[in-house]
Amino acid sequence: MEILITGGAGFVGSHLAERLLQDGHEVTIVDDLSNGRQRWCPTGAAFVTRDLTTQSAIDDVITPDIDLVFHLASRKAVNDDNPRDQFRENTEMTYELVESILEAGVPEFAFTSTSTVYGEAPRPTPEDFAPLEPISSYGASKLACEGILSTAAHSHELTVYNFRFANIVGPRLRGAVIPDFIEKLRDDPESMTILGNGLQEKSYMHIDDCIDAMLHVCEHANEPMATYNLGTRTTTSVDRIADIVADEMGVDPDYEYTGGDRGWTGDVPKMRLSIEKLKSLGWTPSLESDQAVRSSTRELLDEL
């Protein structure tokens, strides 16, 4: 297949590109390098630098030869300094991309959404939970993108695979709790400040499992708008992550807390996605949350 990945120079995108090339597909990466690194792009993938919020910039990239588009590019920070621009850019990228692929006749589209579209929902949260009430601009932008894609899927001959991610961890992860703790403990192995009260508890999924799950859904799902949670059945607290990172680094720091039940405005303190729909499609993760965190800590300690 000929596959295009937006945001393919980022954490998830670069791992996805590697896997697709290993499976024998032709891969083109489109990225503005605001989040990613060109050195993460695997050899064998074509690379194009573009601003995806401008349709004319991608007209020559979206061609009838493309079989599948993975749309991973977005402004990802839940506590973005400019939430209005974040919402606008994320929705504009998706809308412009959808218009281009519909015009070119691309048959399949995969989108990386987020667990934050659910807001503070009961746990475990299934895909058909309602009402969806995100509490961050990031979650709101992803939910709006889902609406754009649902319209395209049900009004045109387009199959959409919509992935609602838990916390994905592994090599190349940046700007998240595990690499943050590693950097803090390298600077000061005696003490560490933890955002919130340390009791925030979420699911963590290893990047290898994430890529496996995405490709499994693309191969086996058959709904026009195929929405699947990607996560694990277990959760891990921020305190537990701190303990795992400290253990792997061989240090025993004192913890200090900024206070409150969440790390920042828009943070969902407790999150666990139901993955029963994914299981019914014939796939389950190989690592649970604690295992994913420990494996990722070891990988990031070697990398950073």
Image: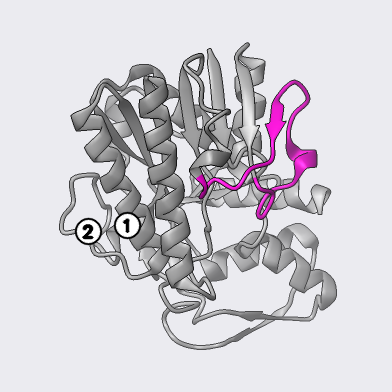
- Look at the image and give the residue range highlighted in magenta: 32-54
The residue indicated by pointer 1 is 117
Residue 105 numbered tag: none
Q: Secondary structure at mark 1?
A: helix
Disc 1 crowd, CA 10 A, few/some/many (<14, 14-19, 20+): many
Image quadrant of residue 83? bottom left
Residue 265 x/y as whole percent: 44, 79
Q: Are marks 2 and 1 in contact (CB under 8 Å)?
A: yes
Mark 2 lies on a secondary structure that is loop
Identify which residue is drawn at 68% across, 67% down.
Answer: 180
**Label 2: which residue?**
132
Badge 2 amino acid: Leu
**Residue 261: x, y in percent?**
41, 81
Q: Position of residue 279 (x, y in %)?
A: 32, 30
Compared with 122, 42 (above or below) is above
Residue at 16% across / 59% down in the picture? 131
Quick check: 170 above or below 14? below
| Separation of residues labelled 2 and 1 (CA atoms) | 6 Å
Q: Quadrant of the C terminus?
A: bottom right
When the figure is inspected, residue 140 is found, relative to residue 214, above or below; the finding is below
Viewer-closest of 66 and 224: 66
Is residue 290 shown left or right of residue 10? Answer: left
Query: What residue is drawn where x is 61% and y is 64%?
Result: 177
**Residue 41 sits inside the magenta stretch:** yes
8 horizontally vs 147: left or right: right
Front residue (pair 23, 137): 137
The answer to whether residue 255 of the structure is visible from this angle is yes
Residue lying farthest front?
Answer: 56
